[in-house]
Image: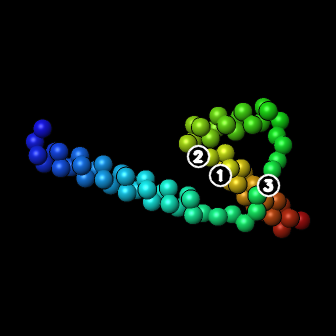
Amino acid sequence: MPRYVEHNIKAIIIAFHHIHNEEDIIMRTRQFSTSLSVALPSEHLEQIKQITDKQQISMAEWVRDAVAMALSKNTENSSDA
């Protein structure tokens, strides 16, 4: 393998690890003020798990996004009344 190709591969790997580590740091330092336990029907939980696996996000992130969307929609509906 030519030396410049080997150098470029190493640079890409280093950049990937740097980006990955920054994302890990952001995820670990992100704090939320309150936790909430919610009982869900097993069908809903399975659907959420399938969606989050496909999107490669945490179930918690998906639920936070769903709550934000519902609250936004509720706010819009309240202002229309």
Amino acid marked by disc 2: Ile
Residue at numbered disc 1 = 61
Q: Nearer the viewer, mark 2 or mark 3?
A: 3
Residue 68 visible in the current orientation: yes
| Mark 2 vs 3, N-terminal side | 3
Using the image, tell me which numbered label, if any, was put on residue 8: none
Residue at numbered disc 2 = 57
Mark 3 Cα within 10 Å, few/some/many (few <14, many 20+)? few
- List x then y, in percent, for residue 12: 28, 50
Residue at numbered disc 3 = 36
- List x then y, in percent, for residue 61: 65, 51
Left or right placement of residue 55 versus residue 44 in this view: left
Is the residue under label 3 in contact with that under label 2 (CB below 8 Å)?
A: no
What residue is drawn where x is 67% and y is 45%? 59
Left or right placement of residue 54 versus residue 19 in this view: right
Residue 42, quarter of picture? top right
Is the residue under label 1 in contact with that under label 2 (CB below 8 Å)?
A: yes
Amino acid marked by disc 3: Leu
- Separation (CA) of disc 2 from disc 3: 19 Å
Residue 27, quarter of picture? bottom right
Q: Nearer the viewer, residue 22 or 48?
A: 22
| Mark 3 vs 1, N-terminal side | 3
In the structure shown, which secondary structural element does the residue marked by tag 1 occupy? helix
What residue is drawn where x is 55% and y is 42%? 56
